[in-house]
Amino acid sequence: MFNLNISVKTLIIPLIGLVYFVFQVYKHWKELCFKGRRLWLAARILLIISLIVVLSGQTLELASKDTSTIFLIDSSLSMKSLSNEIEKYLNEQLMNKKSRDKIAVIGFGRDYMIEIPLQNNINNVNLSSEPNPNFTNIEGAVDFAINYFPEETNRRLVIISDCKENLGNVSSLHNKLRGKGINLEIYPMSNDIRQDVQLTSLEIPKNFYDNGDIQIDLRLDSNITSVGTFFLYCENEQILADRLEVTTGENIFKFNIPLKERESIEFKGEISFEGDKNLRNNKLSKTIEFNDSPRVLILGEGEDTEVIKSLTESIGLKVMTYSPEEVPHDINFISKFQGIFLVNVPHDKLDPDFELNLSKAVKELGTGLMVIGGEESFAMGEYKDTLLEEMLPVSCHMKGKKKKSNVGLILAIDCSGSMDEESNGIKKIDMAKEAAIRSLEILEDEDYLGVLGFSDTLEWIVPFERVIDKDSIKHKIGRLSSKGGTLILPSVAKSVEKLEGAPVKIKHIILLSDGQGEKSGYDEQIKKMEDNKITLSSVAMGSDADVDMLKELSDNTNGRSYMVKGFENIPKIFVKETYLATKKYINNEEFDPLQVDAFDYFPSTYLPPLKGYMGTGIKENASLILKTHLDDPLLATWRYGLGKVLVWTSDLNGRWSTHWIKWDGFYSQWSGLINWYISNEFEGRMKVELMKDGGEVKVLGAVKSQKKKEEMEIVFESPEGLKKYISMEQISPGKYSGKFYLNKAGNYLVNIRLKNRDEIIESVSRRIHMDYSPEYLLDNGDGVDNLRTLANRTQGRIIDEKVNIFEQPLIKSRSEFDIGFILLPFALLLFIFDIAVRKI
């Protein structure tokens, strides 16, 4: 078949040739014989025709003899039970294919994956690809398949699906399919679920008030008539159970729920109906965002939290109190609060997940953080080199002149045979090594350390010397090993002897033993320790230790005594003792606080004395509000990302802060401080709305008085902690639009940010739930109708398992062949023949 497209310009050269041909005929006609005239005329005519065809760019259209077939296999959750049936169908169809035919198999859910690349030789199909099964994106899969087809073959596309498309719109592809000459075959399948009652929506007002009723709007969709029960939970506590009857179609119910407290913003609905075969779509969660009283979280133990709890409640904040070990770790819980207090909390009581999510909430969501001191906080709480310390405006390391006198520390460690015992796979001697190393890390270059191992002999594992080469000392500590009996008295005497003339101001012994030693004979050593201001603290480990003797020895030398059963607690005790012994990080002297800067929320005024604090060092770029008599930080603040972080290095339990708590100005001073730290001065410019439709979430953002170079972005975090950043499109001045897709069921944290270049101007956080995959939505049959319409528009068809899809395709793929490659050489031969005829 020729494509004729000849213009006047294209004919100019052939016309010139034709004139020349006529002239040549007139000139040479009589010179040729009759037979020669006919050959010459035929050659000239064919030559002119060939040139006209070549110069006009004519092509020859040929129908393809080869066929490529792509099977698009729905691998979503709703098709999971049909995978064996699909494999059987594919393998039966393969028996009908021609040897020249090429086959490809592509699995799809939300995404698409090539199961079998396009090829001739396929003997058997075993489906194994795992695209995200929580969604069905037929449009995306079909679009990919269209581009995957080879150009010069007949094309057949077979879609095997239950047609429950919940991402994209395959109907939008009909023009693209029709223009590509693709034969569309649609094989609709259905799973076994026929009877279904679905909890479609749970609508709860965004704001409600104390002692008032709230209205719950419940929507249930059903394809059966049934009776069942609706349960409503508030913070996992059941507040409603009501018997309901549903009919086919949409069912709307309304409830009024009395709610006296607003402590909770998490609601969950659940249904249970007779005859319901699909239980996957029977639960929904709802998060309520309050715009009234801020919520704060207080972490601490007993009396440490009483003052701050009373203070926050008295100024109208919603307060929730937890011990550090019991607080939920997930970001969805932490992000509920505008402010979080850590009150004298040691670092080892914070779960790593809580610490990480606390950092995210402060840095990225603008949550306020206040850390209040005590003897279990900062250096004593082992904040050093942790993520928590990174968040604070102070460090646990004190600098320069703030350090106190140098220290001489001797660790007298029991190395008897019993120290080789294990508990939960941990040896006592290994914990002793770890404890010694942890103590070493606290000491400074000017301090001295000795490690004395005692059993039935004494050995200086680490000679008493200055702490200069810590790596070398750690290597020596590693030589500790268990052997022999227990000689406590000689080890005490040897330690005292070494400390008597030591060039240090502070002298301390930590004695660790798990056995029985000498019962008496310590009076001489106690007298020497008293004369030389040497203190001794004892650690009795295990039930076999001589607890009474060790305690008496510590009491008589102004030290402390510890009784531990769990080996894992030994390093923590050594750390605490080392900090207490050095007296560098804990100060028990009474002093008057000094105000460095006056702030609106903390005006300059009389400040009562304090009896102690934890020593820290102010960080660069932090703001120092109050300091101690030794110039150490007392009250400091800075921004960590979007959030404000405050540090109070004294306590609020009355041990150091008695005068402060009883002070008349305490309430007004601290209420202003707390209100400032949980507030966000940027609030009010941004308005954000989230709309969820299946797995798609649309975000609309508006900004008052938008400034140049401002833009908006979405940061959403999946249930497993993965983040994605999406730039929003500005649709009009001050208005933005964006969308993202949920990958799986779970809780998502969404943060919408207003930015000016890299600076975050304002941030709004929302939580969004996907309780069940859209794959489990009640099937209303719309998907099959959409694909049937698509098939009708593209000359496709709906098939079943009995149809042999390898019949002759309805639409043949045709390719164009440029015949100039043949006619040009042919014209050249004719020209040579023309010359030859005239010469012969």
Image (cartoon, grey):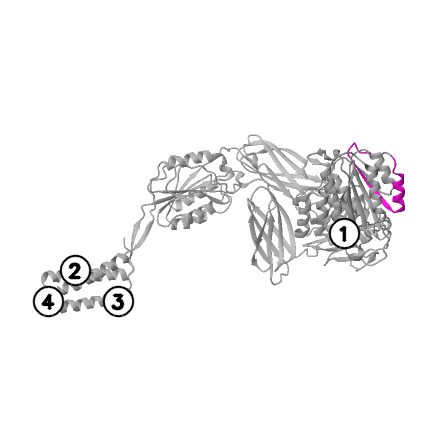
Q: Disc 2 marks which residue?
A: 42
For mark 3, give the secondary structure. Answer: helix
Q: CA separation, marks 3 and 2?
A: 21 Å
Q: Who is closer to the viewer here, 615 or 70?
A: 615
Q: Disc 1 marks which residue?
A: 444
Range of residues picked out in magenta:
520-546
CB atoms at circles 3 and 1 under 8 Å apart?
A: no
Report the side of 791 relative to 676 (left or right): left
Q: CA separation, marks 3 and 1?
A: 99 Å
The correct choice, above or below, for 736 with respect to 497 in the image is below
Q: Who is closer to the viewer here, 218 or 44?
A: 44
Q: CA separation, marks 4 and 3?
A: 29 Å
CB atoms at circles 2 and 1 under 8 Å apart?
A: no
Chain-order first, disc 2 or disc 1: 2
Q: Disc 4 marks which residue?
A: 31
Kind of residue at disc 4: Glu
Mark nearest the camera among 2 and 1 is: 1
What quarter of the picture does the C terminus occupy?
Answer: bottom left
For mark 1, give the secondary structure. Answer: loop
Sort mark 4 into few (<14), some (14-19) or many (20+) by Cα contacts within 10 Å: few
Q: Specify whether residue 524 is painted magenta.
A: yes
Q: Specify whether residue 307 is painted magenta.
A: no
For mark 2, give the secondary structure. Answer: helix
Q: Disc 3 marks which residue?
A: 12
